[in-house]
Image (spheres, rainbow, N blue to C red):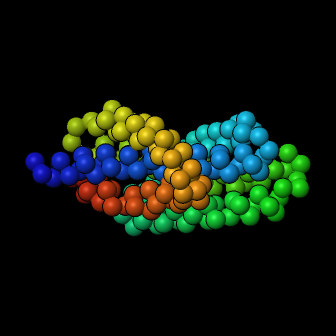
Amino acid sequence: DQGKVSQRAGALAYFALIGLGFMLTEIGIMQRLSVFLGHPVYSLAVVLFALIFFTGLGSFASERLPLTSPARLAVYSLSLAIYLALIAFLLPHINTWFQGYSLAGRIAVSLVLLAPAGLGMGQAFPAGMRLAKGGAGDPTPWLWGVNGAAGVMAGVVAIVVSIAWGITLTLLLGALCYLILPLPATGLFSSSKA
């Protein structure tokens, strides 16, 4: 059935986009903050802690703020993409503005910057799972697999893009992934109501 094929393709594309978007954002921020925090180990620890913690909170909050309509998903995607794009352009300036702070102060600034990004990115995965389960069959293993594979691939893409064209472009590509989420999700909304 053509409808089921397009729904599955939409679900796979949705989960590939959030895998790519998350890792492009994470690696780009980690690269920028390694200079700001003074050492790559600090950046790794702060970014991993913050994103895991805040995406977990965002995932938990997704029950209370569900992305249950195309309009809500579009507003969510646009808001998150704008915030991630702002991070891309503001991080070099934040490095300059707050460089004189103590390490603890710079870590606090980093956490404040990462909290909204993590909360936002944490919403996408559970929202997609709820929508995808509305269709026929159980696509869960495929969606987890595609998301993980896209995340691994994004690690390589992020390094190549950062070296060839800069960290800002890496972060903007992450923002773009979240911006276009509503496109593959359109079929999922109709299937979840079927």
How many numbered markers are drawn?
0
Q: In front: 49, or 159?
A: 159
Q: Extreme top residue here?
A: 141
Name the residue: 40% across, 36% down. 149
Relative image position of residue 80 (x, y in whole percent): 53, 61
Q: Extreme left residue here?
A: 1
Q: In front: 7, or 100?
A: 100
Name the residue: 49% across, 57% down. 173
Asked if residue 61 shows in the view, the reply is: no
Asked if residue 81 shows in the view, the reply is: yes
Relative image position of residue 45 (x, y in whole percent): 70, 36
The quarter of the displayed image where residue 66 is located: bottom left
Q: Extreme front residue here?
A: 164
| Vertical order, 93 against 48 (above or below) | below
Name the residue: 36% across, 39% down. 146
4 on left or right of 187: left
Relative image position of residue 31 (x, y in whole percent): 65, 47
Q: In front: 30, or 114?
A: 30
The quarter of the displayed image where residue 100 is located: bottom right
| Vertical order, 125 against 66 (above or below) | above
91 on left or right of 152: right
129 on left or right of 92: left
Q: In front: 171, or 159?
A: 159
Relative image position of residue 140 (x, y in whole percent): 33, 36
43 on left or right of 128: right
Name the residue: 40% across, 61% down. 180
